Image: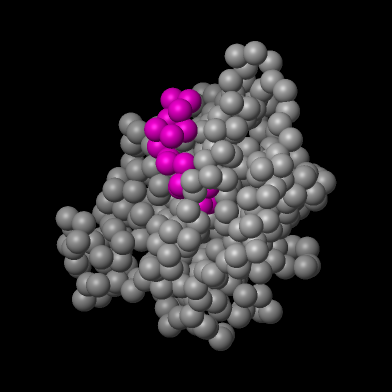
């Protein structure tokens, strides 16, 4: 594996092109007082696009990201971008953290220092981590595969090569959204390499074995499956589109920065613990920095394609399947639908279960202190 240092340096012409496109946005009409009822609010999108065009300072965000130690690794013909912050304590534990959609590696910028240098954040230096945060293939500054089959299992194989190539034969894994799927696949495929698995989401395609010899569904489990189906009917349109025809929508999203921002920011509002006001949890700069990762790298199509690939190989467990690696689950209040512990324990070796009264889908951005503390507490006994 060949590893080279990496810094983000977007060419000026890309930023000029962006501002030109933003200035030429063609706005759709909206029903009076519709707000977010039909999707992204036209009123709010006009506000944030104006900010993007006239006030947002990408160079400042770029410089802040470049303060982290970034690298590119060539693995199986792909360039994988990752942050690698070494722990400041005497015996840092290696930990790979995987983002999801519509997030990116920038989701983890707040939590990385809390884990790599816990002594500077009120915790013990004995609990430090060597933190590795890769960009998934086809996301951000990682190249995308031109072959089909880039699903969570394949990404887990790449992460194993990445961590081994960095000198870590054993390590922990953490993730939400697709990161939870990748971590689950690591636990299924390479339990000898995985010290522990910390999840703040349970993969939507996770289905434990329910065949011969297993107990029937409890009332709680049945209620969860009904809630999951109701959520999918009301909120899952994006997922069905991305799992069936991602390329069609990508033509529009890759061509219109306003359209791309609407597609992504709506999810940050709906899935976060913000009570309908997205800027209660995220600043405009944070929202737009994440959107910029997709826009400047033109990776909206390849990122959505992961939904299609996962549909071909979902996490449907067979009789012998179980993640036997010790697992911790952190449930944040707004993360829904969230399965009950008894459902999760059908497929995972749950050793710790924490329910937080705040936070949502983007836990590392919304509640970094709570998430970092839970990660440290879980891995304390596994060191």
Locate residue 355, reporting x and y percent.
35, 37
At a point 36% along the width and 61% down the height, the residue shown is 112
Residue situated in front as seen by the camera: 75 or 149 = 75
As for residue 156 lying within the magenta part, the answer is no
In the rendered view, how is the structure colored?
Answer: one colour
Residue 269 sits above or below residue 163 on the image:
above
Image quadrant holding the N terminus, namely: bottom right
Residue 237 sits above or below residue 77 on the image:
above
Locate residue 273, reporting x and y percent.
42, 32
Residue 42 sits above or below residue 317 on the image:
above
At a point 45% along the width and 28% down the height, the residue shown is 277
Locate residue 220, reporting x and y percent.
49, 26
As for residue 277 lying within the magenta part, the answer is yes
Residue 198 sits in quarter: bottom left
Image quadrant holding the C terminus, namely: bottom left
Q: Is residue 305 left or right of residue 107?
A: right
At a point 43% along the width and 83% down the height, the residue shown is 167
Residue 277, visible in the rendered structure: yes
Residue situated in front as seen by the camera: 268 or 13 = 13
Residue situated in front as seen by the camera: 250 or 15 = 15
Q: Is residue 42 left or right of residue 96?
A: right
Q: Is residue 365 left or right of residue 120?
A: right
Residue 323 sits above or below residue 82 on the image:
above
- The span picked out in magenta is 273-290
At a point 69% along the width and 66% down the height, the residue shown is 144
């Amino acid at each position: 594996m060949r590893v080279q240092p990496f810094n983000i340096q977007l060419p000026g012409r890309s930023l000029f092109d962006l501002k030109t496109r933003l200035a030429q946005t063609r706005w759709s009409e909206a029903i009076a007082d519709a707000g977010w009822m039909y999707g992204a609010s036209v009123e709010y999108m006009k506000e944030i696009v104006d900010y993007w065009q006239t006030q947002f300072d990408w160079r400042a965000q770029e410089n802040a990201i470049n303060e982290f130690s970034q690298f590119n690794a060539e693995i199986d013909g792909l360039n994988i971008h990752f942050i690698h912050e070494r722990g400041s304590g005497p015996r840092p534990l290696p930990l790979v953290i995987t983002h999801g959609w519509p997030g990116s590696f920038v989701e983890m910028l707040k939590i990385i220092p809390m884990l790599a240098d816990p002594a500077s954040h009120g915790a013990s230096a004995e609990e430090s981590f060597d933190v590795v945060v890769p960009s998934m293939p086809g996301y951000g500054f990682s190249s995308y595969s031109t072959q089909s089959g880039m699903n969570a299992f394949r990404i887990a194989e790449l992460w194993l090569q990445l961590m081994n190539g960095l000198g870590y034969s054993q390590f922990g894994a953490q993730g939400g959204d697709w990161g939870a799927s990748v971590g689950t696949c690591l636990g299924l495929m390479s339990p000898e390499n995985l010290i522990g698995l910390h999840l703040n989401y349970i993969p939507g395609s996770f289905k434990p074995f329910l065949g011969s010899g297993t107990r029937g569904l409890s009332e709680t489990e049945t209620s969860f499956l009904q809630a999951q189906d109701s959520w999918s009917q009301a909120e899952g349109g994006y997922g069905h589109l991305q799992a069936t025809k991602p390329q069609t929508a990508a033509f529009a999203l890759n061509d219109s920065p306003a359209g791309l921002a609407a597609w992504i920011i709506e999810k940050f509002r709906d899935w976060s613990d913000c009570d309908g006001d997205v800027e209660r949890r995220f600043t405009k700069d944070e929202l737009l920095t994440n959107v910029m990762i997709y826009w400047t790298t033109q990776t909206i199509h390849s990122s959505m394609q992961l939904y299609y690939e996962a549909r071909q190989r979902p996490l449907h467990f067979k009789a012998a399947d179980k993640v036997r690696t010790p697992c911790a689950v952190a449930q944040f209040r707004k993360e829904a639908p969230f399965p009950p512990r008894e459902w999760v324990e059908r497929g995972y070796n749950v050793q710790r279960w924490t329910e937080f009264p705040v936070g949502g889908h983007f836990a590392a951005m919304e509640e970094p202190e709570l998430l970092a503390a839970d990660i440290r507490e879980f891995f304390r006994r596994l060191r």
